Amino acid sequence: MQTYRINMKRRSTPTKEAVLDVITKTGKAMSQDAIEKKINIDINRATIYRVLNRFCEDGVLHKVVAEDGKQYFALCLDCDNIHKSINHFHFRCVKCETIECLPTEVNFSIPDKYTVQNVNCVLTGTCKDCF
Amino acid sequence: MQTYRINMKRRSTPTKEAVLDVITKTGKAMSQDAIEKKINIDINRATIYRVLNRFCEDGVLHKVVAEDGKQYFALCLDCDNIHKSINHFHFRCVKCETIECLPTEVNFSIPDKYTVQNVNCVLTGTCKDCF
DNA sequence: CTATTTAATGCGACTATGTTGCTTTAGAAG
DNA sequence: CTTCTAAAGCAACATAGTCGCATTAAATAG
Ligand SMILES: [Mn+2]
Ligand SMILES: [Mn+2]
Ligand SMILES: [Zn+2]
Ligand SMILES: [Zn+2]
């Protein structure tokens, strides 16, 4: 057993605001480079990753790894409201290259003695806008 | 529409045999570097990737991308026999660092106008051997 | 307001992971 | 053996993500 304590000493910085802002406005899961491109101010690559990971630790964002091997970060607001839980499917459109959280819950039964800590499910294809 | 033709002119080489052999014996999904380490003969990195991708094209192997962003390759024999379809869950054990195909089928409903071409579902946690 | 503390940033170096172009090697078939 | 060309080797490249360390700048105390 391990004690887990959320770091409460977060400082509010322009970088954090900008990153969260662009993800919120886009309404999709975004990669580091997509965020960097869409943001007006110049933020270092490593910093963006650190900001994103901090947001994940704090439960503001959640991370998805698509079959392109890249990490995508999406708001967790959707998880609580629209989606049932954090275990929802994600959809990657090969045409518009966007990743979105689906309202579809991931259901599974797991063999005996297995313990699941994380779920990463991505469906790939064509989205409603690119049909 | 595009005509798709499977390349029938595959040659049998020691490399192909060795790669398929180690994957078969391990019985798990393996990454390029794991294969290279476990193989006795010295095979170039790029060659291993090309062999693996060719096997995928030919339906011998299938590829899974885990949340570590790496590609893992597993036998498709299991898909036909043990598993119901190619759309099965995969399990990544954080302790023994192995990835295996689960007999658990992936079921989902997709919103209207979405078309699914590929499914990539990985559960992470502790496997039965590491419990 | 200034001074102090330390979280956050920038920068550079570094580690994979995977791909591609091009030359060389070696299966398969006649 | 000769021919054809798939496959292998090699090197270069691209991208993704991390880490150490110096610097900057929020937060807070005084
Ligand atoms: Mn999501
Ligand atoms: Mn599988
Ligand atoms: Zn789309
Ligand atoms: Zn295990």
Image (tube, coloured by chain):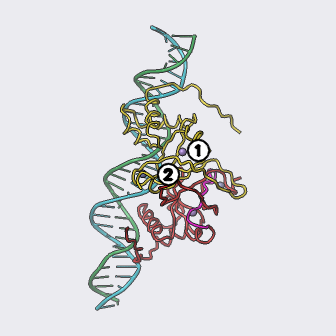
Chain colours: A red, B yellow, C green, D cyan
- The residue drawn where x is 60% and y is 57% is A98
Q: Which mark is residue B7?
A: none
Chain letter, disc 2 residue: B
SS at badge 1:
loop
> In terms of depth relative to the viewer, which is nearer, A4 or C8?
A4
- Where does residue B8 sit, x and y in percent of width and height? 59, 26
Q: What stretch is highlighted in magenta?
A: A84-96
What residue type is disc 2 on?
A: Phe
- Viewer-side residue, C11 vs B131: B131
Nearest the viewer among B54 and B90 is B90
Question: Is residue A92 shown left or right of residue C22?
Answer: right
The answer to whether residue A84 is above or below residue B15 is below
Provide residue B73's location: percent of width, then percent of height.
49, 42
Which structural element holds mark 2? Answer: strand
Residue bearing the label numbered 2? B91
The image shows residue A24, relative to residue C3, as above or below, that is above
Q: How crowded is mark 1: few (under 14 residues within 10 Å), some or many (20 or more)?
A: some
Image quadrant where one finds the N terminus of chain A: bottom left
Quadrant location, ligand no. 2: top right
Q: Position of residue D29 (x, y in %)?
A: 32, 88
Q: What residue type is labelled 1?
A: His
Earlier along the polypeptide chain: callout 1 or callout 2?
1
Q: Residue A128: within the magenta?
A: no
Residue labelled 1 has its Cβ within 8 Å of some atom of ligand 2: yes
Residue A119: x percent and y percent?
52, 58
Which residue sits at x=43%, y=40%?
Answer: B26
Q: Which chain carries label 1?
A: B
The numbered dot on residue B83 is 1
The reply, left or right, for residue C5 in relation to residue A33 is: left
Does A88 appear in magenta?
yes
